[in-house]
Image (tube, helix red, strand yellow):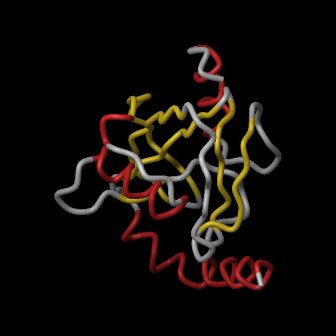
């Protein structure tokens, strides 16, 4: 079933990309670096092109980036947290598949290994990494370097 969603997501992504681009282009988003035991949680989204990335998503109207981060982590990974647990890592601009959008990069450090229950209709896989995996989004390289420099991983 997972392969079905993966293939369906790839087809829908190509078909609907022209319609999605104007909506997502230049909208504010959040990405969350979830860290446990010096490892980073990365996800593969079924709609994207099978590359590892940080969990996150769009910021709704009248929603703070902290609230959006907590909401996205809960929706995608079933990890419940509060807004005060996030540390701002920076404001960045993503350039991905013809999209350009600003996003706030946040760090969420966890002391106890979380039970991750990912949303199978959005996230097809998740894994903990202490170094860059194969098939990663290009901006991950710069972010992993920053995390190492700050001794977070």
Left or right: where 119 falls relative to 8: left
Left or right, 122 with respect to 3, comes to left
The mark total stands at: 0
Q: Residue at x 49, y 43 (%)?
A: 32
Quarter of the image with the C terminus in it: top right
Q: Residue at x 38, y 70 (%)?
A: 22
Q: Nearer the viewer, residue 67 or 26?
A: 67
Tell me what residue is drawn at x 39 percent, y 49 percent.
69
Q: Position of residue 149 (x, y in %)?
A: 61, 14
* Quarter in which the N terminus is drawn: bottom right
Q: Is residue 21 left or right of residue 68?
A: right
Taking depth in this image into account, of 80 and 31 the one nearest to the observer is: 80
Q: Position of residue 56 (x, y in %)?
A: 48, 53
Question: In this picture, is 148 found above or below 51?
Answer: above
| Residue in the picture at 62% in, 34% down | 36
Outermost left residue: 62
Q: Quadrant of residue 105?
A: top left
In the rendered image, the vertical position of residue 32 relative to residue 98, given as above or below: above
- Image coordinates of residue 97 in percent, x first then y, are 59, 60
Residue 57: % across, % down = 44, 58
Residue nearer the viewer, 99 or 118: 118
């Amino acid at each position: 079933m997972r392969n079905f969603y993966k293939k369906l997501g790839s087809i829908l992504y190509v078909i609907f990309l022209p319609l999605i681009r104007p909506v997502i282009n230049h909208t504010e988003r959040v990405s969350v670096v979830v860290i446990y035991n010096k490892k980073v949680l990365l996800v593969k989204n079924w709609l994207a092109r099978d590359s590892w990335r940080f969990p996150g998503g769009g910021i709704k109207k009248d929603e703070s980036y902290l609230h959006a981060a907590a909401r996205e982590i809960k929706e995608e990974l079933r990890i419940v947290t509060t807004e005060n647990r996030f540390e701002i890592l920076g404001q960045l601009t993503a350039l991905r598949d013809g999209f350009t959008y600003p996003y706030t990069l946040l760090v969420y450090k966890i002391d106890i290994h979380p039970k991750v229950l990912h949303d199978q209709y959005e996230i097809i896989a998740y894994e903990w990494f202490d170094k860059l995996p194969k098939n990663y989004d290009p901006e991950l390289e710069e972010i992993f370097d920053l995390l190492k420099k700050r001794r977070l991983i």
